[in-house]
Amino acid sequence: MKTTRRELLKRGAKTGLLLLGGTALYEVVSGSELLTGGAPLRHAMAVDLRRCLQEEGCDRCAAACHGAHNVPRIADELRAVKWIWKDEMGRIFPETVGRIANAELREKKTVVLCNHCTNAPCVRVCPTGATFSREDGIVMMDQHRCIGCRYCMAACPYGSRSFNWYDPRRFLSEDAINPDYPTRTRGVVEKCDFCAERLDTGGRPLCVEACRAGALIHGNLNDPGSDLRRALQGRFALRRRAELDTDPGIYYLL
Amino acid sequence: MIQKAFHGGKLYWLLLGALAAVAAAGVWFYLRQLELGLSVTGMVRDVSWGLYIAQFTFFVGVAASAVTVVLPYYLHDHRAFGKITIMGEFLAVSSVVMCMLFIFVDLGQPFRVLHVFLYPSPTSPMFWDTVVLFGYLVLNLVIAWTVLGAEYRGTPPPGWVRPLIYLSIPWAVSIHTITAFLYAGLPGRHLWLSAITAARFLASAFSSGPSLLILLCMAVRRFTTFDPGKEAIRSMGKIVAYAFSAHVFFILLEIFTSFYSGVGSHRESFVYLFRGLEGHAALAPALWASAILALAALVLIVVPKTRNSLRVLPLTVAMVFVSIWLEKGLGFVVGGFIPSPLGAVTEYRPTAPEIFITAGVWALGFMLLAAFFKVFITVRREA
């Protein structure tokens, strides 16, 4: 008998339940069931929760990213600029982890960043094409074209975009600026660019390199032999708000 | 004809002077915003649109409402409106100008605004909104000026203006529909992601717009030599009665679906707006005021005796206007952002600079409107 997708998801849910020790989980994707296709290269990333959740208080990924990308260090948390940061599991997955009884797991933190969606709402709504999707799945920003209307921030269902409410250069000390990466100006939106400049020369994203726990795995989602696909194989993964069909490129391995 | 705007009595210049003072304060604060960035506003990461975009949304509705006097006059030959269609069109022009200013002051990089035309993006409702708003501005300005100009010269309006008038009717619907699409197409913002959003916007537009026009007509009646006529004012009252009933009905539909379905995420914004979440309820007083005003106004506008009383009507339509302003010009836009995608409840409180800039845009819009009305009334008196 052929296994339907629904049954597979049910089985996945049960496995997820065992793994997380909570109530039902759904929207589970398994490595062998990936719907791939389209371009030969689709950059994506997996967050291995078993490894990441153990590293409480670790922010090496964010420190490496923010340092190299000249992300301003703004004390005003409500107007902070963030490319990658840690948030509570229960808030990242409100429909699944957010509903389980295990408060300890709900409050554990893991990384969030731009999901580099295939059907990115931010790209769809941008009135100037300042944010756009590349063939290889990276959602990019052209900060010189951005008019600062912040429509993309309203459209992003993940809260992954930051606006420069302040002049960001005021929050960067002269000697800490990385001269190889541009600083931004006030009044434009910015976000994680998946280290496109590194990926284009065969490198890996900085957060992946910085992670000592080996919790972040980058790779080509459309290449069955990639590190990423191997990591996804045989494990179940969650994606944020998968029901919105944005097709996020960040997988959270259970 | 434009010279008529520069001849007026003491009252006219006093009004313009007062508005100019408010506008100047707005400009001064805007220069500070240009210097310091949008950090001078109350907007934050999680609530990234505030008073400016909310006012924009509200005034697109006021602009669209010109159709409520144009359509009955030109399609149904409702003669009473013959005296006020031009006022409706001038109100539309002033409102669209305000909308554009609200968008402009909201931009982080205002000097790049022409990028919208330099890099047209047809997948973006904001691109289309810009296009239809510009079109609507031009249409109403050309129509009103041409029809009034003909009257000034004592000739019938030229034939070519008629098709433009017919075109302006669906065009009015389009501006508010596309403004609704700005919101109604966003995944994950449940207060906005509703097929009824555009219908709601039109219903609230066709109540708040004519309400303002009634108040303006009453003011014109009182302070100038021109009388728009009791029949025209009562007809507009009837339009408000229908549109406002639809507006209240549509909100109740939203509330039914959000709560009866039991889907938590659909409910949260409503709960935030009326009761608050996690102890944060900054907007609840405004939303309750809006609801109470709406129910009281609904009774007064539906009952014929109070609707037709020219003493009660101004009070009723003022209540309608304020109720919709609170619901749409504040609650709808801000409420859509709360809670945030990561479940945070961050409140929005507009700052003094933001309020002054907003008041400044209002003042500029009303200065324009006062000048238009001055021209209109003078031409009518001399014709």
Image: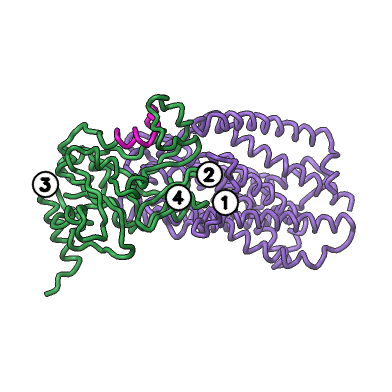
Chain colours: A green, B purple
Residue situated in front as seen by the camera: A73 or B273: A73
- In the depicted view, which residue is nearer to us: B227 or B344? B344
User: Residue at the location (44% across, 48% down)?
Assistant: A152
> Considering only order in the chain, which callout, 3 or 2, is on the residue closer to the N terminus?
3
Residue under circle 2?
Answer: A147
| Residue B132 shown left or right of residue A22 in the figure | right
User: Percent x, y for residue A25?
Assistant: 18, 53
Is A122 displayed left or right of B151 in the figure?
left
In magenta stretch: residue A159: no
Residue B47 visible in the displayed image: yes
- 10 Å crowding of disc 1: few (<14), some (14-19), many (20+): many
The segment highlighted magenta reads A63-77
Percent position of residue B196, x then y:
46, 59
Q: Which mark is residue B116?
A: 1
Alpha carbon separation for disc pair 2 and 1 = 8 Å
Q: Closer to the camera: disc 2 or disc 3?
A: 2
Q: Element type at marker 2?
A: loop
